[in-house]
Image (tube, grey):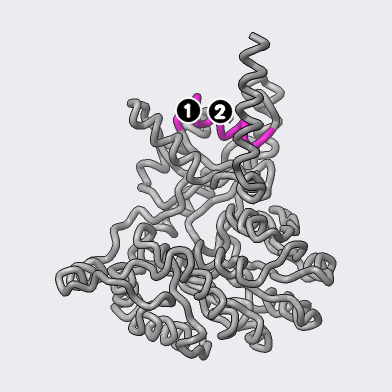
Amino acid sequence: MASAQTESQAQVAHQKSVLSIRVQAIKESPTLAITAKAGKYRAEGRDIIGLAAGEPDFDTPQHIKDAAKKAIDAGFTKYTPVAGIPGLKKAIVNKFKNENGFDYKLNEVIVGVGGKQTIFNLCLAVLNKGDEVIIPAPYWVSYADIALVAEATPVIIECGIEQGFKLMPQQLEAAITAKTKIFMINSPSNPTGAVYSLSELQALGDVLLKHPHVLVATDDMYEHVNLTGDKFYNILNATPALKDRCIVLNGVSKAYSMTGWRIGYAAGPAYIIKAMEILQSQSTSNATSISQVAAQAALEGPQDCITPMVTAFKERHTYVVNRFNSMPGLSCLMAGGAFYAFPDARCAIEGLYQAGKIKANTDMALAEYLLEKFDVAVVPGSAFGAEGYFRISFATSMDNLRNALDRIERALK
C-alpha cells in the first residue's frame, strides 16, 4: 500500500516537472468543467438540468446562417488577414460609431477567435511579470487566470451584494499602485448582471484620469442583453478622455446567439491592436473565414432579431429572481443585463451544513449537493471570486427553470 502511494506521488511529481509553472498556476474553466460533468451524467441517463453554461438557448438568426452558407458555396474558405476581413472590420467600425459614438480606424480594430482570445491577446501584449491587474469581484472566471498566464498579479476587489456588485470609486483609488497596468470592467456583468450607470462610470473615470499609467479594458459582451431598456453606457462614454488608453472588447456571441461561431473583437490604440495582431499571427492566425462573414451579416443586418431573445430573458429573469427570494437562506438582486442570476446563498449554506446535508460550509459543497442529489448543475460563486454565492443561467426554457428551481427549493428545505 505504502509502495503504491509512493509510486503515485512520484508520478505526480514527474508530471509537475514536465508541465510549465504557467499552466500549473491556472485552473480549468469551472463553468466548462461543471457543464462537462453534467453532460456526462446526462449521457448516463440521469435527468440533469444544466444551468451552468452561459449561452443563449436560441438558434442563430436565419439571415446570418444564410450568409455563412453563401460564403461556403462561393469558396470563401481560405486564409484571411490575421486581424479580420475588411468587410467585418468596417462593420465593427460602423457599429462603434452608430451605437456607441466612438470613432475608430480600421487599424484600431481586431477580430479574434471569440471574446476570450481578444482578452488573452491584450493581456499578453501589455503585461509583464510583476504588473498588476485590478479585477472587481464577482468577475468573469477567466480574467484572473489570463492575467496569471501573462505572469501578472490579479488584484481582486470584493464588491458584494451589499453594494450591488459594483466597484466603488474609493475602492478603485485604494487599489491602484505604481504596478497597476490594467483595470478590467465588465458591464453588464457576468456573473451578476450588474450594470453601471453613467454617473457611476464617470466617478470611476475620474479616479482613472488621475493615474495615466493605467490601461482600461471594458468588456461589453452583454451590451445588447439589456433587461431594463435603459440606454447602454460604458466607461469610454462616461470619460472620453480615456480613449488613448482604453480597449473596448465585444463580440457577436451573446447578442446574436453565435457562441460556437467564435468571433470576438476589440478596438483601441493602434499600437496595442497591432501588438495583439502579432500575437494572433503566431497563435491561431485569422478567425474562421466563414464565421467572419456570418459576423459581418450579424452587425450589418436587421437588429430586430435580438428583440425576441431579450424579451424572453426579461420574463425568465423576473421569475427566477422572485423564486430565489422566496426560498429560505437566499437573497437575489434584480439584474440590469446579461442572462444570469447570482443569489447570495451564505445563510442557506450554513443551514445545510449545520443540518449535516453538506460536508463543508462552502459554495462548492452546495453546488455538489445540488448536482449529486437533485440533478441541477449550477456554478459556485467562488469560481467568480465570490464565496457563498452561486450562478445560474436563465438562458434556458421556462419549463427547465421551473423544474430546476423546484428542485433547488426542495434541496434547501
How many numbered marks are there?
2
Which residue is depicted at the point 32% across and 81% down?
300
Q: Estimate the x, y position of residue 95 in percent, counting from the top left.
A: 43, 83
Q: Judge left or right: residue 274 versus residue 375.
A: right
For this rendering, which residue is in front, 39 or 359? Answer: 39
Q: In terms of secondary structure, where does tag 1 sit?
A: helix
Q: Which segment is the magenta one?
A: 362-375
Q: Is residue 38 left or right of residue 197?
A: left
Say which quarter of the image contains residue 285. Answer: bottom left
Q: Toward which corner of the image does residue 262 lie, by quadrant?
A: bottom left
Rendered-image quadrant of the C terminus: top right
- Tell me residue 355's x, y (percent): 67, 21
Q: Image check: 142 left or right of 78? A: right
Which mark is on residue 183? none
- Find disc 2 in the rendering and name its residue: 369
Cα gap from disc 2 to disc 1, whole angstroms: 7 Å
Q: Is residue 374 magenta?
A: yes
Residue 45 in view of the camera: yes
Which residue was labeled with disc 1? 374
Frontmost residue, 216 versus 239: 216
Identify the mark nearer the N-term, 2 or 1: 2
For the point 32% across and 72% down, the residue is 79
- Dots 2 and 1: beta carbons under 8 Å? yes
